[in-house]
Image (cartoon, coloured by chain):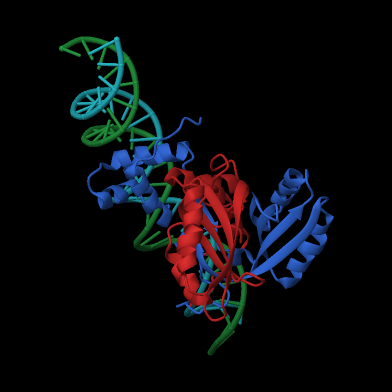
Chain colours: A blue, B red, C cyan, D green
Amino acid sequence: MSQRYIVDDLDREIIRYLSEDGRLSAAEIAGRIGSVSERTIRNRIAGLLQAKMIVIGAIPDPVALGRDVQVELLIEVEPGKLEDVAIQLGEYEEIGYLAATSGTANLSASLFVADHAALLEFIDQELGKLPGVKRVTSSVVLRLYKVFGTRTTAISRGTDLGGKKKG
Amino acid sequence: MSQRYIVDDLDREIIRYLSEDGRLSAAEIAGRIGSVSERTIRNRIAGLLQAKMIVIGAIPDPVALGRDVQVELLIEVEPGKLEDVAIQLGEYEEIGYLAATSGTANLSASLFVADHAALLEFIDQELGKLPGVKRVTSSVVLRLYKVFGTRTTAISRGTDLGGKKKG
DNA sequence: CATCGATGTTGCCGTTTCGGTAACAATCTG
DNA sequence: CAGATTGTTACCGAAACGGCAACATCGATG
């Protein structure tokens, strides 16, 4: 359970390595850091995972799943309906990110769809039928510069539309 | 460019498992799917990684790194300055997500800072000194419902993630 | 229609990595 | 200073991984 895990410099260094490559072995990390045993690294990683300080997961390129269009949504919800709308929205596979925020819009979300037709349908049909949704502002993502705290290149490939930098 | 990797149903199923837990072993995945050998799963994972269809990485809870406040920024940039501003913004560690979008704001970003004071300072000092930034709208993230296509709870209590954000 | 070639699956095998356990060191407490 | 607590490290058997080669599948060819 959630006993506060205290993250020290060693943890942060490990996190840094794992952020770039979640499959790095403990031995490899220990080797790079230099002053710690491989077993200790493994202990720390286990601790960080257990305390939920980090989550190691595969981040799919949306394009890999056939979703070429990424859209940012700002949603205004009627007072009192926020939680309901959020829960329902969260059910959709197309929604990759969802958060409640301060400001005019109460909800902020990221939508991943196959094409513009799918975008229109989602906003008109799906969002339209959710009770409590007052207004939706959508912005198409034209280019990704940074994701997961990492400048694109890693995951970018086709994710960034327009990509002038592919190699 | 890379030879386009063709993602089939098996790949998608594997991606689904790995998204939830990037540390799942090939044997475990093969067992759950049932009809494929463990060796094949390993081949597929290697292929997906090599083709950059997925990236396996540790996603840190910003709180673990001492950043308790997450903010979504919408930035209006003067015509012609977008790329410049994007590149400079991307340099900041505090920026976890950055994308160019259609709409009133040209740039959308996620900012992770320690506290409100740091937020104010970042917007006033750092953003303020970037030439080309016309206007900034900030929304504090109050609650995260979903990140990386995964409903939160998995990672931390409510403040989460560093990275992909609204978008 | 038999053959060749390309692609994907699977088993085998040596090496690496992992998790459990326990000895050991460093710290803290009374 | 003894005792308790926490973190580091070595050791060990089990599991996972990567390289390799055999085999099945499918399609094009002569």
Residue A122: x and y in percent read 76, 62
Relative vertical location of residue A37 with respect to residue A29 in this rendering, above or below: above
Apparent side of residue A148 relative to residue B33 in the rendered image (left or right):
left
Apparent side of residue A8 relative to residue B75 in the rendered image (left or right):
left
State the quadrant of the C terminus of chain B: bottom right
Name the residue at 43% across, 58% down. B93
Q: Is residue B95 visible?
A: no
Q: Is residue B142 visible?
A: yes
| Residue A34 or residue A147, whichever sits in front | A147
Apparent side of residue A15 relative to residue B27 in the rendered image (left or right):
left
| Residue A77 or residue D13, whichever sits in front | A77
Name the residue at 72% across, 51% down. A89
| Residue B73 or residue B116, whichever sits in front | B116
Residue D23: x and y in percent read 49, 61
Relative vertical location of residue A32 with respect to residue B89 in this rendering, above or below: above
Residue C13: x and y in percent read 33, 50
Name the residue at 30% across, 51% down. A28
State the image quarter where residue A4 is shown. top left
Residue B42: x and y in percent read 47, 55
